[in-house]
Amino acid sequence: MTKPVLFTPIALREVKLRNRIAISPMCQYSAKDGVANDWHFAHLARFALGGAGLIFVEATAVRREGRITHGDLGLWEDAQIAPLRRIAEFLKAEGAVPAIQLGHAGRKASMQRPWHGNGPLDANDSARGEEVWPIVAPSPLPMDEGWLVPHALDRGEMATLREDFRRATLRAVDAGFEAVEIHGAHGYLLQSFLSPIGNRRNDAYGGDRAGRMRFPLEVVETVRAAWPKERPLFFRVSAVDGLEGGWTLDDTVALAQELKARGIDVVDCSSGGIAGSATAARIPRSPGFQLPFAERVRREAGIKTMAVGLILEAHQAEAALEAGQADLIAIGREALYDPNWPLRAERALTGEAGMFDFSHWPVQAGWWLERRERGLRVAHEPSGQRRF
């Protein structure tokens, strides 16, 4: 039978993925001083064992003040490299491509961990030793009533941030990552520059779309120059704000064209977040609801895209790739529910032909599962048809 597109390898520059399945960056809010620990290792290792082609480490702050919460990972200092290198080495040893998302939370920094309320830090957080810190943004606009008012960045501070991105990128190289994604979505710093809801500047970094794109594009140029030419660079967008007067899909197509010209290889198409929680948007949610964003960006900007958002089952993902809606499929919370989603998807798409094929599973597990499958088949055959 024809090999499913979902399990056809793809080359991004000189990096080859074994399949088209990526694991989205998913914040665990479990670091101390930005340093990865055993939780992060176990969380990410299971996705490599589960067969994913590309695995992203969660949003990783390029400076301490750029964290969302006190529990965020960071790459603002060299001491944070070694624990991430341990993760990258394991992912690669198990056949996955290790990747990392770099970002700055902007006006959505200095927040509570989700299980402590997911709002501004308060007295309860202070009692736990998690104090408020000053935040920055393109304009002094709080995310919502009761949230911190950010300091508006000046040009010197913006230059410092570009340098932070450059240094974090070099640390990502040192840690052994083979792909980097710049976080330009969900209301964090770069998206707040892009969106007219978050950016009310009247200088060269605000105003019309070209002005609002200027700083994010400068960050892209900085990261691309520091990142090895043979390795791919991703950029995550909120394709739409989903709010009146906000960033639109037309804007995203225009941005994608500029990203391509600056060496971005894949646009990761998410949405929402300019106000409220990370992925909050006033658009209907249903399985694959963001696929049309990835499809239009791919078609009109002529750049590879990664689709994400309620892609829940194998045939849905395969149909999206066959229709040319995206080049990669990113799985997030569904992978938390089933870390073996890629391996199970392959069996679902290959049907009877793949029933006894566990060759892509880790041999330590596949050896047992193949025998169990054969045992179950024998047990369900009528006694007169059993073949021993």
Image (cartoon, rainbow, N blue to C red):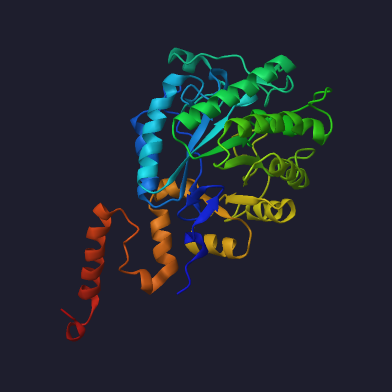
| Residue 210 visible to the viewer | yes
Please say if 274 is above or below 79: below
Q: Position of residue 291 (x, y in %)?
A: 63, 55
Q: Quadrant of the N terminus?
A: bottom left
* Front one among 116 and 232: 232
Residue at the spot x=32%, y=56% of the render?
A: 361
* Front one among 219 and 379: 219
Please say if 181 is above or below 291: above
Question: Residue reaching furthest bottom?
Answer: 384
How many marks on residues? 0
Q: Position of residue 366 (x, y in %)?
A: 27, 58
Describe residue 356's horizontal placement relative to residue 106 as left or right.
Answer: left
Residue at the spot x=39%, y=49% of the render?
A: 95
Q: Position of residue 39 (x, y in %)?
A: 36, 33
Q: Quadrant of the C terminus?
A: bottom left
| Residue 61 visible to the viewer | no
Q: Splitting the image into 4 quarters, where does residue 258 fall?
A: top right
Q: Splitting the image into 4 quarters, where does residue 200 fall?
A: top right
Residue at the spot x=59%, y=61% of the render?
A: 320
Q: Position of residue 218 (x, y in %)?
A: 70, 29
